Amino acid sequence: MIEPVEVRVVGFGMGPQHVTPEAAGALAGCDYALAVSKRDDDPLLAVRRAVCEAHGVELVVVPDPERDRSPGLDRAGYEGAVADWYAARLAAYRSVLTERGGVCAFLVWGDPSLYDGTIRIVRDLAVPYDVLPGISAPQMLAARHGIVLHDVGQPVHVTTARRLRADVAAGQRNVVVMLTGGVDLEGFEDWTIWWGANLGGAGERLVSGLVRDVVEDIGAARVAAKAEAGWVMDLFLLRAPVDGSDGSDGGDGGDAEGSDDGAA
């Protein structure tokens, strides 16, 4: 175990405006925060920097190691490339922690509990740590659209775009979809969608309605969000028709182009 080091994994939503009082208190007790940069003008790093500046915490940045993305890699080659990249990132973090010691914050978009690998990384670093929750993207999606993520007494299933069709085939009818990178909605034309991008941040966009009516609007809004912010993070709630209806409950006020404030 590296000594003396303590890590705080801090969810910060989409920026300084979403840092909870609990997270703010944790950051106040940190000596620095640690992050990787994918390029010199990384806009996502800029948001982390703004969080640190708002709370008087130094941000230590290490370059994200290169990963072999050769198109000819087979599955074993791909898995090996990912393992090598992960080991190199761990080594970069470990070098900083060993040199500096103290209390270090790892800043996590949204909340660390959903589709984020930071806790696994910190565990592999074998250092003492605690976790401070943040405002999650599904919370922001529901708030922005003014909806509940599930019908009365019904479940909501959280998944990824890659698993969407398999999960629907297995019987899921009310699905929050994350890690989209864009998504093919063919076959879901009669389902209702509540979609959002960059929720609470620069380039926020919202679209809702029957998929067949709004799929082109979603594509255009996604392009606009990326053009405005330099990056795009989107997710959506997808709900099946009920008893052959069109799936719309009329409860979210229809389509909307979001404002530039808030968080995700």
Image (cartoon, helix red, strand yellow):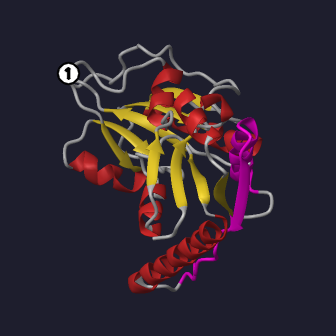
- Residue 242 inside the magenta-drawn segment: no
Residue under numbered circle 1: 153
Q: Residue 69 placed where, x, y %?
A: 57, 78
Q: Secondary structure at mark 1?
A: loop
The structure residue drawn at horizontal position 73% and vertical position 47%, both measured from the top left corner, is: 49
The structure residue drawn at horizontal position 33% and vertical position 23%, both measured from the top left corner, is: 246
Locate the C terminus and report the quarter of the image it occupies: top right
Q: Amino acid at mark 1?
A: Gly
Which residue is situated farthest in the right direction here?
41
Q: Nearer the viewer, residue 33 or 250?
A: 33
Locate the N terminus and report the quarter of the image it occupies: bottom left
**How busy is the neighbourhood of tag 1: few (under 14 within 10 Å), some, or many (20 plus)?**
few
Tell whether 230 sits left or right of 248.
right
Q: Residue 102 placed where, x, y %?
A: 61, 57
- Whether residue 185 is visible: no
Vertically, is 65 above or below 6? below
- Residue 70 inside the magenta-drawn segment: yes
Q: Residue 47 placed where, x, y %?
A: 71, 44
Q: Quadrant of residue 152?
A: top left
Tell whether 199 sits left or right of 203.
left
Q: Nearer the viewer, residue 166 or 199?
A: 199
The structure residue drawn at horizontal position 68% and vertical position 24%, both measured from the top left corner, is: 259
Vertically, is 121 above or below 112? below
The segment highlighted magenta reads 42-71
